[in-house]
Image (tube, rainbow, N blue to C red):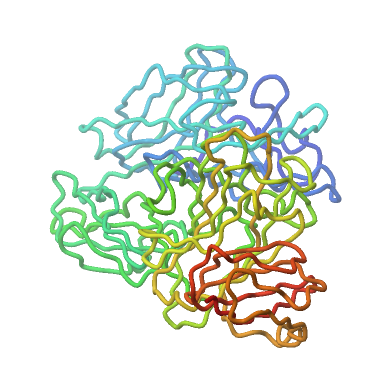
Amino acid sequence: MPVSSGFTADVIANGTGSSSVSTNTDVDGVSFAFVARDFKLTSSSSAIDYGIPVDGIINSVVGTTPGLSYQLADLNSNNSLKLSAAGQNGTLVFTTPTAAFKLYMLSTSGSGTSVVNVTVTFTDNTTQSFSGINLSDWYGGSNYAIQGIGRINRGNDVLESNTSNPRLYQSVLNIDTGNQTKPIQSVTVTKSSGAGIPNIFAFSAEAYTTCIAPVLQTVAALTSNSAQVSWTVPAGTQAASHDIYYSTSGTLPNSSTVPNYSGVTGTSYTISNLSSSTTYYYWVRTNCSSGTGQSAWSFAGSFTTLCGTVIPSYTNNFTTFPGNCWTVALSGGAPATGSTGTTAYWAQRNFLNTSANGPSANMNLYSVNRVGWLKTVPFDLSAGGYRVKFKYGVTTYSGTTASAMGSDDIVHFIVSDDGGSTWTILQTWNSSNGPSNSSNDYIYNLTANTSANTVFAFYGSSGTVNDSQDYNFYVDDFTVESAQLSTSEVGRQAKTAAVHPNPFKDILYLSDTKDLRKVTVGDASGRIVKTFEGSVKELNLSELNSGLYFVTLYFKDGSQSTVKAIKK
């Protein structure tokens, strides 16, 4: 609802130069004005990342009116109807009188709350009055259309930024049924009481029509590539069909926007061919069989498609935590039963508590009964030939030194080939093989994992014993990729080692342990059944069953060598 006249104050500092030049008064009576995003005290001043949008468009964040926006007056001229004293009033005249079901008022109250009365005047000179409209103080009130816009002291040009204040608020004025067909010519606002100073900035309208916009309902049947949207038709509207427009942008459609689907009959439709884990915005309008013919677009709706499976290669470095389509709010239970709660115990932290390493995933293990899961995005491994790898380590909670794991603490790395219903343990870390405080590499060839819905998870438990240890277990650079070695990896395979005797009974000896970092023993399915840290010379495998095993030696230079060994 553009305003042709009636604003009395310029309370928004903008452009380059002192705020006392680009404004003529304050908002609150105590020298503070709003600030626009293009404000600079001097041409060399740093740009600010808050403030009133330069184009003056305020997109309301009130949940009941998605898509509602306001247009402020020119930031270089009077842009507020400021009412300092009780009984003071002013009239805003609209450029184009418009009939409406509702008027929405954008305002705030500086230096305290205030109360105003509003009189709506129609083009036939009849009126409708609204009394006792409460305006919140510009700091901390509810039902705000925009927040965190900052302010400036007109006396000394000191800027004050804040992520949640000051605020502009939204008030609704419901037009009586008998007045809804009358174009609204002007609005008169009068301050009736309160210590605060009302500032009225803009009006928007839900325009009257005999073909009323539909009301969107909750999205149903949401998948990774489709969504079923539905709506209701307001009473009295003779709907012949509907149009649907959707986009990954929240930009509002207008009368010239070409819909994605036209002539839809009924009140629901399944939008297909969407991208997974993507947020979409959508609008519906009605084509009527009588009256004004076509409604305006509805208020905006939105939905986010579900996560789809990922075909490797894939890496999550946890810069964004936990990562797109990863799940962290899982707790309790065990790999055999699955999770039972929704507490998040895994969090983001610099790898090994060192800022130079950048962010990683970490679980703080201490006390008792802390059981947390960190679950990955699902992977399609049906092509076969993949491997999973990541870096891991342990440090004290607040430092970078090494820490032992508690007596019954456990961290499992687990895999599920059915999307998370059943789990298999690939690797276990506990008090007997707790990681060092340096970066350790884990690599597992997914020979037996060729499901189209494979999910991995890290499972951490502090057990039931209240040990003295308080430490972090870290995971970083989680990668699923082709198991084919790169050129650099092939070049590093010079280090090899022999084992003896082979076949063996209980003890397996290593012929050369120079520069050895750790050893893993895997069974024929590829599952790691034993891990030995450090430069060990013999492997006690007495508890293993007879059969074929793969012994992998990891060297300090990053190379590795795998040999087969048979237990009698």
Q: How many marks?
A: 0
For residue 130, above or below residue 473: above
| Left or right of 12, for residue 288 | left
Residue 63 lies in quadrant: top left
Residue 447 location in percent, x, y?
49, 79
Give the residue at x 59% y 50%.
55
| Left or right of 181, for residue 205 | right
Residue 70 location in percent, x, y?
48, 43
Give the residue at x 14% y 60%.
240
The reply to whether residue 253 is visible in this rendering is: no
| Left or right of 276, for residue 230 | left
Residue 100 lies in quadrant: top left
The reply to whether residue 154 is visible in this rendering is: yes
Residue 296 location in percent, x, y?
30, 53
Give the residue at x 71% y 31%.
24
Q: Closer to the camera, 213 or 165?
A: 165
Q: Closer to the camera, 339 or 448?
A: 448
Give the residue at x 51% y 25%.
90
For residue 1, above or below residue 105: below
For residue 197, above or below residue 18: above
Residue 73 location in percent, x, y?
56, 42
